[in-house]
Image (spheres, grey):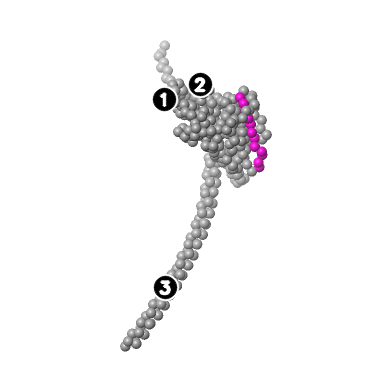
């Protein structure tokens, strides 16, 4: 029997991806099971917060309140889903910034991601929101055993929210003085990774709440003070909603030229995406060109005004020179007469 040497098949992309995934899991496991930082000491805030109102218990087993603003034709409706940080807004003690957006609030105090998911699936709204903001649940910092477990709960929440409403984005959880910054960073990165994998935009909050500014929190070190802390959070909510709606707003569409039909219909997905990107780039260039044109016209008007001013100054200078020459000529004539008299 002849000896046959079997040569291994070349490893493909799927094998390399699985190896990379195992490596990531190993690194994640090392990070997740790190012992808490021994030098961390929970902090207390110095701010104040209005007394919370009592809500009825909902399907999640937590108290719950839903506030939907009156319909406004000229304002886009944004629904914010979150935990007790939204309580003061729902109660009317803290107001959202004014503008072309109206905010509905779905608050479930004490909720982790699984509770928020239950409330999202059970919610009944009078109209479909233009966008839905998921305020990432900070309660998973203490209820989840590891960042990976928190991330998996958060993934289910986002999937359920997107199944109900098409336009979803995430604002990261509000940091706490009672949990080590290392753990908060790990969970924040986990939430960011989950949102990115689902193609859902996510906006950060951690850098806007410095831990040394204790007046941003109340004494429990968890909830934000009404004036300073909630003032920052409401601004972040408004800015994130505005930026998200601006980015996702569909561009005005014009009928394509007739000769483009065969090209578009026969194009591949990548070619269509390239065509869309090029169209958007051209539209942006046109908009920039229009802006530059208006700026040029304004600059030309200013130059014309300066030129007229220069002409007036030149006329004034010429008049002064003529007056000086006349006076100088009269003076010379007088001096000549005096010299004749002397002779």
Q: Place residue 69 in its image quadrant.
A: top right
Q: Residue pushed farthest top?
A: 1
Most frequent secondary structure within the magenta stretch: loop
Whether residue 186 appears in this view of the structure is no
Query: Label 1 to label 3, Cα distance in Å?
Result: 84 Å
What count of labels does the image hold? 3
Whether residue 234 appears in this view of the structure is yes
Q: Place residue 5 in its image quadrant.
A: top left
Q: Mark 2 points at which residue?
A: 145
Q: Which numbered disc covers residue 321?
A: 3
Q: Residue placed at 53% from the left, 54% from the top?
A: 294
Q: Which is nearer the N-term, disc 1 or disc 3?
A: 1
Compared to 50, does 75 lie above or below? below
Q: Place residue 230 in its image quadrant.
A: top right
Say what secondary structure mark 2 lies in. loop
Q: Residue pushed farthest left?
A: 343
Q: Residue placed at 60% from the left, 40% from the top?
A: 101
Looking at the rendered image, the quarter that the N terminus falls into is top left
Q: Residue pushed farthest right?
A: 126
Q: Residue placed at 66% from the left, 39% from the top?
A: 71
Looking at the rendered image, the quarter that the C terminus falls into is bottom left
Q: In this view, does 330 lie to the left or right of 164?
A: left
Q: Give the range drawn in magenta.
A: 62-73
Query: Label 2 to label 3, Cα distance in Å?
Result: 91 Å
Q: Name the residue under label 1.
A: 39
Say what secondary structure mark 1 lies in. loop
Q: Which is nearer the N-term, disc 2 or disc 1?
A: 1
Q: Residue placed at 58% from the left, 27% from the top?
A: 109
From the top left corner, tell me how far across and down residue 220 is, in percent.
52, 28
């Amino acid at each position: 029997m002849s000896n046959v040497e079997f040569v291994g098949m070349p490893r493909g992309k799927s094998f390399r991806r699985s190896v990379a995934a195992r490596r990531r899991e190993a690194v994640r496991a090392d990070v997740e099971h790190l012992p808490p930082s021994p030098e961390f000491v929970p902090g207390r805030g110095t701010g104040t917060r209005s007394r919370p109102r009592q809500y009825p218990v909902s399907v999640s087993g937590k108290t719950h309140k839903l506030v939907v603003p009156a319909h406004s034709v000229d304002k886009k409706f944004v629904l914010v889903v979150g935990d007790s940080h939204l309580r003061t807004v729902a109660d009317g003690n803290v107001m959202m910034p004014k503008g072309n957006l109206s905010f509905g609030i779905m608050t479930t105090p004490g909720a982790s991601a699984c509770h928020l998911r239950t409330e999202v699936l059970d919610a009944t709204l009078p109209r479909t929101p233009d966008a839905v903001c998921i305020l990432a649940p900070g309660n998973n910092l203490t209820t989840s055993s590891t960042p990976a477990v928190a991330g998996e709960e958060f993934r289910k929440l986002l999937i359920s929210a997107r199944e109900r409403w098409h336009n979803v984005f995430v604002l990261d959880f509000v940091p706490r003085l009672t949990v080590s910054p290392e753990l908060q960073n790990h969970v924040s990165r986990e939430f960011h990774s989950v949102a990115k994998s689902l193609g859902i935009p996510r906006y950060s909050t951690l850098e806007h709440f410095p831990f040394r500014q204790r007046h941003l929190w109340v004494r429990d070190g968890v909830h934000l003070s009404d004036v300073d802390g909630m003032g920052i959070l409401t601004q972040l909510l408004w800015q994130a909603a505005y930026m998200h709606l601006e980015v996702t707003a569909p561009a005005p569409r014009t009928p394509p030229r007739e000769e483009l039909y065969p090209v578009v219909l026969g194009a591949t997905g990548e070619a269509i995406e390239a065509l869309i990107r090029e169209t958007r780039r051209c539209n942006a260039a046109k908009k920039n060109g229009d802006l530059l044109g208006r700026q040029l016209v304004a600059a030309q008007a200013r130059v014309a005004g300066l030129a007229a001013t220069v002409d007036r100054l030149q006329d004034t200078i010429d008049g002064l020179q003529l007056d000086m020459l006349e006076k100088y000529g009269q003076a010379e004539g007088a001096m000549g007469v005096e010299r004749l008299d002397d002779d």
